[in-house]
Amino acid sequence: MSTEAPKRDQWQWENATAGAAAGFATVAVMHPLDVVRTRFQVNDGRVSNFPSYKNTAHAVFTIARSEGLRGLYAGFLPGVLGSTISWSLYFFFYDRAKQRYARNREGKLSPGLHLASAAEAGAIVSFFTNPVWLVKTRLQLQTPLHQTRPYSGVYDAFRTIMREEGFSALYRGIVPGLFLQVSHGAIQFTAYEELRKVIVDFKSKGSTVDNQNPDKLLNSVDYAVLGATSKLAAVLLTYPFQVIRARLQQRPSGDGVPRYMDTLHVVKETARFESVRGFYKGITANLLKNAPASSITFIVYENVLKLLKPARRND
């Protein structure tokens, strides 16, 4: 019996494990900036229950002073859970898609197929993780100015949302979330793969390293540069989807009516009152968080993968 299928499945689970470790490390380090970003995103200047921050540094200082460390790490548990699940599933399905596309192409993929692989993985991950991101957003937006009873934790948030708004509320923001996950991941991973090829080609000139194992040419600095650069490209092109999703996922007011009814309503209201600038609120905190966060993610992912490869070969 051929052992090819078990080896391929094992390789995919190694990618999933490495992705999960990368996601956890990223959130643990960068979460306070995620809280700041979310609060900037939903503050349209017309809502009284959100504090007004001058800039990212002022936001961090204000939250730390008025809410303490708990405020800076609001939504941390669903953030860790969502990021770990998201990265794990993303790398798993991304690797599966690449293997499927590469079967009849001698293992070589074009930028278009890298894009298709990333988009496919992103679409699948969106449906699994949207409820977790919604709860994270709700917890991050709880401030001392809120009049409604705050959620006491992740379980209470899920239970209260289901009781007050129904199951469908867990999928508020799924449309922009789907566009975000597909486009963001596709752009980031395509840029990562193509830049990786450039670096490998450059380093391989005059190198005695086996061309069948180009990973030996790359180190953590390379992974950091690749991760930050690819993330920067993805953030700049897809950020408005993040703002739209965050605004849709806000908790309804006391009368139970959501501030924004759907994606089109968010777009119309934001364009009307805030113009293009409104779609990029919080982008400074987002870049400060995601450029180094993506570096951490890919450093952890690639190095965990290297640790797992010898174990696979020894089985």
Image (cartoon, rainbow, N blue to C red):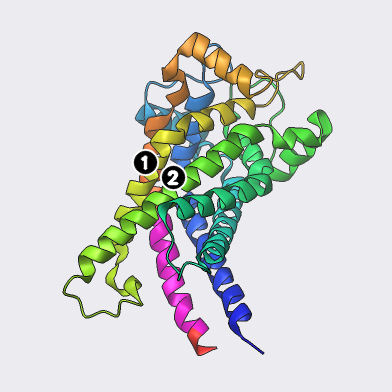
Q: Is mark 2 on a helix, strand or loop?
A: helix
Residue 113 lies left or right of residue 163; in this view the side is left
At label 1, counting other C-alpha atoms closer than 10 Å, the crowd grade (few under 14, some 14-19, many 20 or more) is: some
Question: Residue at the left extreme?
Answer: 206
Mark 1 vs mark 2, CA separation in Å: 7 Å
> Of the numbered discs in the image, which one, if any, rests on residue 187?
2
Q: Specify the principal SS of the magenta part.
A: helix
Let me know if residue 143 appears in the view.
Answer: no
Decide which of 9, 281 is in the foreground and name it: 9
Q: How crowded is mark 2: few (under 14 residues within 10 Å), some or many (20 or more)?
A: many
Above or below for 183 versus 258: below
Q: The N terminus appears in which quarter of the rendering?
A: bottom right
Q: In this view, does 143 lie above or below 275?
A: below
Frontmost residue, 137 versus 51: 137
Viewer-proximal residue among 4 and 131: 4
As drawn, the label of residue 260 is none
Circle 1: residue type: Ala
Residue 203 coordinates in the image, percent (x, y): 21, 67
* Disc 1 and disc 2 in contact, CB within 8 angstroms: yes
Q: How many labels does the image show?
A: 2
Asked where in the image residue 88 lies, by quadrant, the reply is bottom right
The reply to whether residue 191 is in sight is yes
Q: Where residue 123 appears, x then y in whole percent?
A: 61, 46
Q: Specify the segment rendered in magenta.
A: 295-312
Q: Does the magenta run of residues contain 1?
A: no
Which residue type carries mark 2?
Ile
- In the image: residue 311, left or right of residue 250: left
Q: Measured from the top left, where is residue 248 in percent x and y?
A: 63, 26
